[in-house]
Amino acid sequence: MTAQIENTGPLTTEAGAPVADNQNSETAGSGGPVLVQDQLLLEKLAHFNRERIPERVVHARGAGAYGTFTVTADVTKYTRAKFLSEIGKETEVFLRFSTVAGNLGAADAVRDPRGFAVKFYTEEGNYDLVGNNTPVFFIKDAIKFPDFIHTQKRDPYTGSQEADNVWDFWSLSPESTHQVTWLFGDRGIPASYRHMDGFGSHTFQWNNEAGEVFWVKYHFKTDQGIKCLTQDEADVLAGKDPDSHQRDLRESIERGDYPSWTVGVQIMPAAEAANYRFNPFDLTKVWPHADYPVIEIGKLELNRNPQNIFAEVEQSIFSPHHFVPGIGPSPDKMLQGRLFAYGDAHRYRVGINADQLPVNRPHATEARSHGRDGFMYDGRHGGAKNYEPNSFGGPNETGRALWQPVPVAGTTGDIPAPSHAEDNDFVQAGNLYRLMTEEEKGRLIDNLAGFIAKVSRDDIVKRAIENFRQADEDYGRRLEAAVKALRG
Ligand code: HEM
């Protein structure tokens, strides 16, 4: 299906003057040079040269859709967020899915985490939950993120992704073993964006009217069921239909087959955090459901396609720091880094007024800041005063923070996040491996071995396998044998 084309009158220039000829540029006589006075030609060429904006440095490739979030449980004892205040309450959302490493034109069917970024247009401002389809991540400190992504992207010399770089970094960052086990397992290549779960991944703060604090983790369970591709299936699909995920999402919404997710949270009372067996703010770890069960709180449905991909998907911005009253950050060192990174990326990629574009601005309230001017400012504030405090009836601060303060201790320093009683880099990777069936283990080993076998240096191969052996002796032994069989 293609969108309707509007035709309400003559073609015009950008300034609105009618265009007489859009096929022939203006020349000096027949066969002569083109004239500078052909402003239509110059305007078209100049506009065309400026059609691109910088692609996202990660998650460049994606697709989005609008929908509705509906509350299905009473969570008012945990959070005072208004959009969660009543069973049955509906909030408009925009969700952008993505892959991580590929550039804008890359294929969808690849082994890579998928982004799962949700913008809730709430009456208290936009709340963005910028998560993935994996509950954990490769690293646990934002200071490592640029290095990590450099190993996933193109090598400065070869211009390609290099197995040497990927495994050099992962093997030297043993905290990645859990996420790598997840990624090379059966769920590593979703069949589509509709057939995968989403996670907020980090731990976030909820606080209620009484000021009590809870730590929460978000889960979006697909109602379509999990469907994945094997490496062989994905290799074929990526070549045949590079846009497979994007097409699947758009077409399912066009035919009224609206994808949905059941939304749940794990909730930890603040007092339990200090002595929990794992550091609850460590992004490389899950909270086992036996410790904190997932409580269902809502339904998320996607039911409207964007009309203009560039305006609504490419220019959409999601910021982990977009919180609303009753929700805030945790001390997770990754999350803390992200609180800076996204706003900065948006100012660079879309511009200082990115927040005011239709897809990004609040839909259920209005922004009443004193931010003004800059490139592409539309003058929305008219003659209103641009400072506070003021005595001309401008908007005022509320005196109530969105989130509650948390206690801190010690001195400043480059200090790793604290380890709790059962924390190490391998325990949950081993648990995940032992949960798999024999067939699942076999596919995991094959997928890992196929990639590790491409590494050129024996010391990197050895170190990589050692990490998996530390997670589980059998895991390491089988991987070593599989890699040996491929490398000879
Ligand atoms: C410190 C670690 C991280 C940093 C510095 C970082 C940085 C970034 C940046 C700069 C972008 C591009 C933003 C834009 O241009 O609009 C981005 C996109 C994204 N990141 Fe991260 N990221 C980090 C970790 C994570 C983690 C842990 C997750 C998921 C749990 C995640 C999920 C996403 C998603 C879903 C997008 C795409 C958002 C969209 O659809 O526009 N990132 N990240």
Image (tube, rainbow, N blue to C red):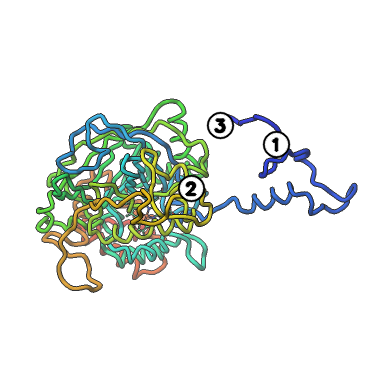
Q: Return the disc, 2 or 3, that comes first in the chain's sequence.
A: 3
Residue lying furthest front: 391
Q: Which residue is mark 1?
A: 11
The answer to whether residue 422 is above or below residue 105 is: below
Q: Is residue 215 visible?
A: yes
Q: Amino acid at mark 1?
A: Leu
Q: Amino acid at mark 2?
A: Gly
Residue lying furthest top: 256
Residue lying furthest right: 30
Residue neighbourhood size for the residue with mark 2, other residues' Cα within 10 Å, grouped as few (<14), some (14–19), many (≥20): few
Q: CA distance from mark 2 to mark 3?
A: 35 Å
Q: CA distance from mark 2 to mark 1?
A: 32 Å
Q: Quadrant of ligand 1?
A: bottom left
> What's the residue at 28%, 40% (across, down)?
220
Q: Return the disc, 1 or 3, that comes first in the chain's sequence.
A: 3
Secondary structure under the numbered disc 2 in the rendered image: loop
> What's the residue at 43%, 41% (across, down)?
233
Secondary structure under the numbered disc 3 in the rendered image: loop
Q: Mark number for residue 352? A: none
Residue 413, x across and y down, in percent: 23, 74
Question: In front: mark 2 or mark 3?
Answer: 2
Q: Which residue is mark 3?
A: 3
Residue 372, x across and y down, in percent: 46, 55
> What's the residue at 70%, 39% (across, down)?
12
Q: Amino acid at mark 3?
A: Ala
Q: Are marks 1 and 3 in contact (CB under 8 Å)?
A: no
Q: Which residue is mark 2?
A: 382
**Quadrant position of the C terminus in the picture:** bottom left
> What's the residue at 42%, 37% (across, down)?
65
Secondary structure under the numbered disc 1 in the rendered image: loop
Q: Are marks 2 and 1 in contact (CB under 8 Å)?
A: no
Residue 376, x across and y down, in percent: 53, 52
